[in-house]
Amino acid sequence: KSSCRKSEPVADTSSFKSSQARRGSDTTDGQDEEITFGSEAGLEKKEKKERIITKRFAVAKQMLDEETEYVRLLRSTVRSIVRSTLHQTRTGELRDFPAHMILFLDGLEQIYVINLQFLQDLQMRVNTWYQQQPLGELFLQLGPLVLLYQD
């Protein structure tokens, strides 16, 4: 076998570079952007930015919908199973219930309380949405929840 390959033609980029120079470039001044290269390209950039903002809101809304359902399921579980079982173990009605299960059920109630607070905070963010709405700090507040999952 021969290791020689036909060389492919090299594209001439000089016309591309000169057309870029004629159009100019975009510059950023803090948060405001000044577009110096034609209204069509500026419009495309603005539309792209609006699509990103719309996608961010859609993600936040999806998070809200999923967290709402999760909290609803947790609430139902805590009310129907956890509280009655814990009550029965405390009053002695339910004997020989494993200690690790008591810890697990108690942890579920704590998870419910933390997720309920997260849901309320997320709901407030979505209701007062603006394009730079921060969401990451909501997750930082979930630190105690991570510890519950570790136990």
Image (cartoon, rainbow, N blue to C red):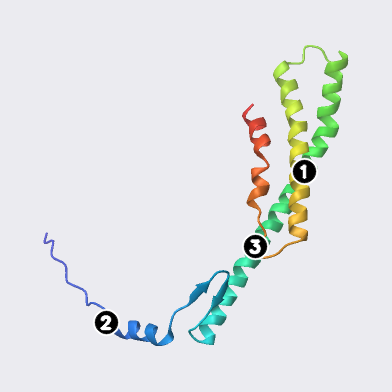
Task: Give the mark nearer the N terminus: 2 vs 1.
Answer: 2
Q: Quadrant of residue 60?
A: bottom right
In the image, residue 129 lies at what x, y percent?
A: 73, 62
Circle 1 SS class: helix
Q: Few, some or many C-alpha atoms within 10 Å of disc 3 (few <14, some 14-19, many ≥20)? A: few
Q: Residue at x 83, y 23 (%)?
A: 85
Q: Few, some or many C-alpha atoms within 10 Å of disc 1 (few <14, some 14-19, many ≥20)? A: some
Residue wearing tag 3: 132
Direction left: furthest residue: 2
Vertical order, 127 against 141 (above or below) = below
Residue 67 lies left or right of residue 87; in this view the side is: left
Circles 2 and 3: CB distance less than 8 Å? no
Give the position of the N terminus as an image quadrant: bottom left
Circle 3 SS class: loop
Circle 2 SS class: loop
CA gap, disc 3 and disc 1: 22 Å
Residue wearing tag 2: 12
Task: Give the mark nearer the N terminus: 2 vs 3.
Answer: 2
CA gap, disc 2 and disc 1: 60 Å
Tell me which amino acid carries mark 3.
Gln
Camera-nearest label, 2 or 1: 1
Direction front: furthest residue: 29
Vertical order, 104 against 43 (above or below) = above
Viewer-proximal residue, 86 or 35?
35
Residue wearing tag 1: 117
Tell me which amino acid carries mark 2.
Asp
Vertical order, 143 against 43 (above or below) = above
